[in-house]
Image: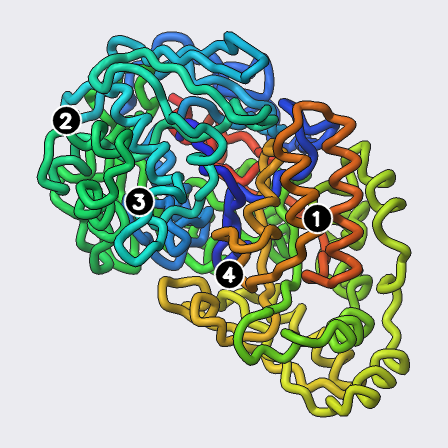
Amino acid sequence: MRGKRISKAVAVGAALALALTACAPGGGDAPSESAKTSESSSGTNSVEPANSGLADLGDIKTQDAEIKVSVGAPEFIGYNSNTPQTYSTYNSAITDRVLSGFSYFGTDGAIYPNDDLVAYEKVSDDPLTIKYTIKPEAKWSDGTPITVADAVLSWATQNANLKNAKGKQLFDSVSADLGDTVPKGPEGDADGKEFTVTFKDPDPDWQIQSWMGLPAHVVAKQGGMSTTELVDAIRANDAKKVTKAAEFWNTGWTTKPGALPDADLIPSSGPYKLKSWSAGQSVTLEANENYYGTPAATKTLTFRFIDDGAMVQALQNKDLNVIAPQPTVDTLSQLEALGDAVNIQKGDTLTWEHLDFNFRDKAAFKDSLELRQAFAMCVPRQEIVDNLIKPLNPEAKVLNAREVFPFQENYAAVVDASYDGRYDNVDIEGAKKIVDEQNAKGTKVRIGYSAPNPRRTDEVAMIKSSCDQAGFEVVDAGDPKFFAPGGTQERGDYDVALFAWAGSGQITSGQNIYATGKPQNYGEFSNKEVDAAWTTLASSLDPAVHLEQTKKIEKLLWDDLFGIPLFAHPGLSASTSDILNVRHTATQSQIVWNAEQWVRAE
């Protein structure tokens, strides 16, 4: 579970959308007064939490029981969740229970250290230098000590300066900036427990940089070398020696659905380990008996792949114990009808819906700002919020920013400086005039999203009803494999993508989405002024600079129309009344963020 941070956003898959560690709305260690949790989830904890982090449950003896949960994933992708093809909230919901990080996000986006695994301290501001001490007892489930070598591998996978013979980044990682951010990487003995990192420039997100990921000893062996040899080759920037190991990291853990790799290839550094995988049905985790930290409260945790529409019935039948469906009015009313049999968790979230234009190949809007403007003029944003979101959150508003949320204190200041309200109201005649001037009547607009997704289907239907009047021909291009490896999104076979980014407390993650050539800039948008503003923001520790550059970035993204923000997602999950310690979170970690603390009431 412990929060890991690949340096970016998270693609909220089919039910919620695409979620990566994504654009960190807000910033700092605690994103303002966000993450309000409803009282309906209180009184269901074995121990009341002292703060937004993990509760201190005292001495834990693992209960020999099973808890079944669904976050809606259509399928498990694999042990490595850190490639552009696999990094989604669905996959991370499972792998974050198995692979620990050095820090994690509390329910409000506050950052907490993973005390089970590491202690760290800032030893210098200029240059920014951090010392890490891995706990002596920390080890992989196969008994191999967790060491500096694991941190070096994590750094290497995010180092775009390590290139293969064709000049491409050696490791196919969703994050690619750590090699420039920390040029020397982790400094310390490969088999030791202490290391330091020295940042080239100040990094406002230094606490959530990812220094712990996949097992170096496994990658080294598959690369035909010892762990020490792998570390030496990485530090020498010897891409040729590292190539075989990198190829394994990129694809070696990707198997056919239902086929877990051999156990010796998938050791755990977290409270759970992978036990079994039934294709299209479920993934089962079991408590890691060799875990060095606080044991899992429940022995077996099973993730079931169930469509949102079937979750409430499964919860009522106790085929599931915890569910995280996409919030809809019908779902909420069905849950409320179950009365005291369930606990409902609701609250604000840092996940937001948006339409992103495709700037690749022959996409309809690639070369025409005017057509992008016309499309933005006909998208019925207020109607979408009024009909689909306000029944769940009466205070919901149309979202007019990407890096801040309506419930955050700096939202008004950012929006006032960056957006003039030009797309607040639908203007069919204005849009039609532009379409006619561009001789573009009948332009086909394929809106791609991960299906099935009833709310997104409704959104597309509303957009079609409006924008077709302006001369566009909107096509519902929903596809179960839209975000799958090799799917529609990866191929670029769409004009507009409809999905969501799920954020946490990260300040700089949006750089990975909007800056030129970054791994999560799926539509290949490019604006030099945006790039420069992100560079300035990402190299400062000053909140005033962050705010100034955020205003600039937001204005540029509106003026050039990267895409169209729609709304912040309302949070909704539920659990059977006998399951304790299920707690709402506003962050991308989802309801399973503290799953190792869930336990049946006795």
Res. 309 mark: 4
| Residue located beneath label 2 in the image | 142
Q: Position of residue 307 (x, y in %)?
A: 45, 60
Q: Quadrant of the C terminus?
A: top left
Q: Amino acid at mark 3?
A: Asn
Q: Secondary structure at mark 3?
A: loop
| Residue located beneath label 1 in the image | 402
Q: Is residue 328 left or right of residue 521?
A: right
Q: Position of residue 317 (x, y in %)?
A: 41, 49
* Pair 4/2: label in front: 2
Q: Residues within 10 Å of mark 4 (few under 14, many from 20)?
A: some
Separation of marks 2 and 1 at Cα, in angstroms: 42 Å
Point out the tag, 2 or 3, that comes first from the N-terminus: 3
- Callout 2–callout 3 Cβ contact below 8 Å: no
Q: Amino acid at mark 2?
A: Asp
Q: Amino acid at mark 1?
A: Arg
Q: Is residue 197 left or right of residue 543?
A: left
